[in-house]
């Protein structure tokens, strides 16, 4: 496995592979890899000839009061894990290498970037869309892989790729969970023991919403009210940013289950101490 730090080197290698008829699978990450990331690498390895994994903590998607400086980093550990799963290249640039001097261009996916997490993290998805487009251009990927835990991010990237005619297939993979149901995240390590024990309430409430809807309840606004009450009763949950029902294709908010609905997205974002966690479930009708 080769570690690449320069944009020009990564693009040179990728173009050479593409000219040789090699298909490239790309897994973008911010590092501190967990089983969710590794499942994407395994999927890419099965579907593509070569796999590039980026490890880059992107400063432009963090707000001024967010955890950019303390975000976990361990390139030696990440390299070993990625290599074990069959990654062929690690792209590990610096922020200076990625953005250089005087970077002014950004990608804005209107409306989709301002709801849900975008409402509480202004500019976040602008940073995500911009860095992903840059990474796709650099790696010349045929396929790019995202986990469904970051569902809004996945929808935004799909929309960006479609709108801007980017020649890549966006592949999604199911959320990987701990044994008790908590969605795997690099930020889980921030949680205290008690916060970690209680964080599973997010998954339980998603399951509760699933049961209510499949049990025949159609008033999503009422289900939302009941779920928010359940969440707010947890003493270790500091704050709920949102618990919402959305159309899984376009993220339009839903207040009722309609007869034409085949799938409904339930999504949540909440704080345990100083740690913000997100989770979701696509409810199939």
Image (cartoon, helix red, strand yellow):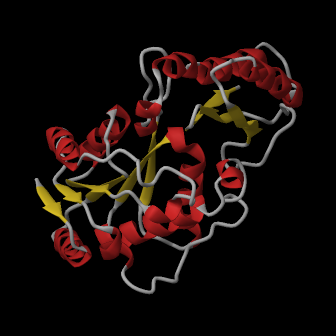
Question: How far across and how far down the image is residue 162, in percent?
Answer: 56, 66
Q: Is residue 273 visible?
A: yes
Relative to residue 102, is residue 228 drawn left or right? Answer: right
Give residue 30's position: percent from left, percent from top.
37, 51
| Image side of residue 152 versus residue 221, left or right | left
Tell me if I can see residue 159 in this picture. no
Residue in view at x 57 percent, y 17 percent:
198
Count of numbered labels shown in the rendering: 0
Q: Is the residue 33 above or below the residue 199 in the image?
A: below
Q: Residue furthest bottom?
A: 102
Check the image and report above or below for 142 versus 153: below
Quadrant showing the C terminus: top right
Query: Compared to 278, does 127 lie above or below?
Result: below
Q: Is 218 displayed left or right of 106 in the figure?
A: right
Q: Is residue 170 left or right of residue 54?
A: right
Residue shown at 50% from the left, 23% from the top: 182
Q: Residue furthest left?
A: 1
Q: Residue at x 53, y 22 (%)?
A: 195
- Residue 160, x across and y down, in percent: 56, 65
Q: Quadrant of residue 265?
A: top right
Look at 42% across and 21% down and name the residue there: 178
């Amino acid at each position: 496995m080769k570690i690449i730090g320069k944009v020009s080197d990564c693009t040179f290698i990728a173009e050479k592979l593409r000219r040789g008829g090699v298909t490239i699978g790309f897994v973008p990450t911010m590092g501190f890899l967990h089983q969710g990331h590794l499942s994407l690498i395994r999927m890419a390895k099965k579907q593509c000839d070569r796999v590039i994994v980026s490890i880059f903590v992107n400063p432009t998607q963090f707000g001024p009061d967010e955890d950019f400086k303390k975000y976990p980093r361990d390139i030696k550990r990440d390299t070993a894990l990625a290599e074990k799963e069959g990654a062929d290249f690690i792209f590990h640039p610096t922020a200076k290498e990625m953005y250089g001097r005087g970077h002014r261009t950004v990608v804005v996916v209107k409306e989709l970037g301002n709801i849900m997490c975008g409402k509480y993290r202004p500019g976040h998805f602008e940073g995500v869309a911009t860095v992903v487009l840059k990474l796709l251009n650099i790696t010349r990927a045929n396929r790019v892989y995202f986990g469904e835990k970051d569902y809004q991010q996945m929808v935004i990237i799909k929309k960006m790729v479609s709108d801007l005619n980017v020649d890549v297939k966006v592949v999604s993979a199911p959320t990987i969970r701990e044994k008790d149901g908590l969605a795997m995240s690099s930020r889980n390590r921030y949680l205290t023991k008690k916060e970690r024990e209680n964080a599973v309430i997010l998954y339980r409430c998603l399951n509760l919403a699933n049961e209510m809807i499949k049990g025949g309840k159609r008033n999503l606004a009422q289900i939302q009210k009941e779920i928010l009450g359940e969440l707010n009763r947890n003493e270790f949950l500091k704050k709920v940013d949102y618990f919402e029902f959305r159309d899984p294709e376009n993220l339009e908010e839903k207040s009722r289950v309609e007869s034409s609905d085949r799938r409904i997205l339930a999504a949540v974002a909440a704080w345990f101490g100083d740690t913000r966690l997100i989770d979701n479930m696509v409810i199939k009708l």
